[in-house]
Image (cartoon, rainbow, N blue to C red):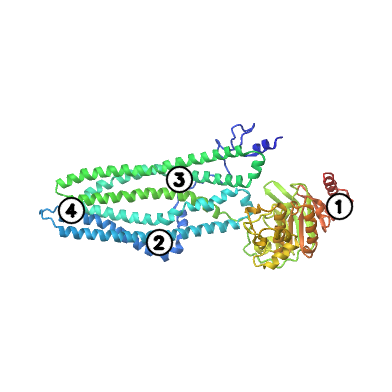
Amino acid sequence: MNPAAETNKQRPGAANKNNPKGKTPGVTGERFVYQDDEVIEKPFNWSQLTRLFAYMKPYAKQMLPLVLLMMVLGTITKLTVPFLTSQAIDKAIAPKDGNTSLTLLYLLTAAALVLYIIQWIASTYRIRLTNIIGQRVIYDLRSHLFQHIQKLSFNFFDKRPAGSVLVRITNDVNSLQELFTNGVVNLMIDCVQLVGIVVILMLINWKLGLAVVLTVPIMFFISTKLRVKIRRAWQEVRMKNSRINSHLNESIQGIRVTQAYTQEQENIKFFDKMNMDSKKSWDRASTLNQGFGPLIEITGGIGTLILFWFGAYLIQEGQLTVGLLVAFSSYVGNFWEPINRLGQMYNQLLVAMASSERIFEFIDEKPHIDDKPNARPMPKITGDIKLENVVFEYEKGRPALKGINLDVKAGQTIALVGHTGSGKSTIINLLSRFYDITGGKITIDGLDIRDVKLDTLRSQIGIVLQDTFIFSGTIRDNIRFGRLDATDEEIEEVAKAVDAHEFIMKLPNGYDTEVEERGNMLSMGQRQLLSFARALLADPRILILDEATASIDTETELKIQEALKVLLKGRTSFIVAHRLSTIRHADKIVVLDHGEIKEEGNHQELMQKQGTYHGLIEAQFRFV
């Protein structure tokens, strides 16, 4: 079969003979769905909003009184200026007795100017304070989310693409920034301003005030029809952005495979489809969102018509002066402004709710693997390990291990061999308690690993994986990741022990050479040597090598084997290997098949049995 065709067949949403339109199985239409990207259907509830605003609590006592003071001061000055304007018209420009007063006009103008200056100062200081509070809240929220994700178990990440997790920490948190920096304070300002304006309007002329304010219920009745649609639309936008981020992460990580199989055009088409889907959802949400503005303007226009028609009538009747009508007009203008902002604020809340629901969905996720309430620290490990009738299922009804019994003495080297899917990696994952067993018991030095604190258990277990991860930073930083308080001399010592020192010194800056993302500037073998050095620096009591020599050339492997003879002495170790030549000297070899132990013994014993292990050795040497 053509490998490129096989790749195309396996890609979700790619067209093939069983799926001619490239639709994702089990999904309506042609939407690309990841497991966690469902639209969260929850009612708009104030309890969740209160939970979100709780992040502002630490800063409330420090800065909120000043913010409120500036807010009240700015609102009072803003509401006072129209009154001064009415006095200037009625008493200085066009008084009833016809005697204009330039002196009074100058005084009122100067007073208005002073009020504008006070308003500007109050507004500037308030915005500065709210921006500080907002940025600190965003910092705290993002830190809390990241810290919580760090504690979640492997099965959480098994079900979610990395890009989907990234979008929660970046995009969803960023979308709350405007709400925290300006939204909350503006909401309070607008509410205070509205109450003040309504009171003033009623004091000036309650008939005219009532006629103008009657248009507000009409506006709210119409706008409520859009609310549910807007909220769902913004949830859809967040969902589509999450999918794009997930696909981008996958595409960048897999660019070598994409180019190797000449699937660039297919990948571009796949991305374009997702990108267009995101654009359409954004356009729809934006259109609904912008519906509030014209709605407010139309309602405001109707209110203005009522104002001048009824106001002119009241002037003719002698119940209102021209100056008061001008002031009334100014207050009405100021009335519609906060109403408009409140409409926008509600849209902002809808966007915030869509994001906060996704953020709190992760925060509410409980680690499947966690310390018991009475968990105690793990003492220094000697290395006696027992697996007693261990059963494990990644998915219910599909056992990966079926009643495993294994007795390991301290200092022994145990090799786990078997075909792919036999349960080798599952056993080492359970030893480190990345997953909890479904049945049975695992003890280390007689202690059930579920009864001890996770960090004290894992800190005494070192793991070297086949697909080792190299972080951005220097060679020295990557080795020191095994033990952060290690000295430079200790780092060089372990590097020499695993034969990494020689290649490191050939790099431009030796141990201070900056490696690229995931260590791409290094060969697979060099990355494996660094991971060996990292694990050995941690000086674990139990060392696990999961296909750790698979990417190392034979000459380097021989050097490592010699180093390991010394380094593994007195340390319980597990070696998972397909290259059976690397495990001949193991104290015990455990042969697994479909989650069960088929054979157990050292190399000589198993070869004499002429069983499964003998068959694996013979098969491997036939293909060498």
In percent of width and height, residue 606 lies at 86, 52
Question: Which residue is more in the foreground, 506 or 302?
Answer: 506
Q: Pointers 4 and 1 in contact (CB under 8 A)?
A: no
Q: What kind of residue is marked 4?
A: Ile
* Residue 376 location, quadrant: bottom right
What separation in Å lies between label 4 and label 3 (alpha carbons)?
47 Å
Foreground residue, 113 or 70?
113
Sequence-wise first label, 4 or 3: 4
Q: Secondary structure at mark 4?
A: helix
What residue is disc 1 on? 606
Residue at the spot 50% in from the left edge and 53% down from the top edge: 173
Q: How packed is label 2: few (under 14 Cα within 10 Å), some, or many (20 or more)? A: some
**Relative depth, front residue between 255 and 59:** 255
Q: Earlier in the sequence, mark 4 or mark 1?
A: 4
Dot 3 corresponds to which residue? Answer: 231
Relative to 586, residue 33 above or below:
above
Is the N terminus in the top left, top right, bottom left or bottom right quadrant? top right
Picture coordinates of residue 601, whole percent (x, y): 84, 55
Q: Which mark is residue 486?
A: none
Q: Nearer the viewer, mark 4 or mark 3?
A: 4
Residue position marked by numbered label 2 in the rendering: 129
Q: Quadrant of residue 294?
A: top left
Q: Which residue is found at the position 62% from the left and 53% from the top?
A: 517
Q: Residues within 10 Å of mark 3 (few under 14, many from 20)?
A: many
Q: Earlier in the sequence, mark 2 or mark 3?
A: 2
Give, as a three-letter code, the residue at label 3.
Arg
For disc 4, the marked residue is: 89
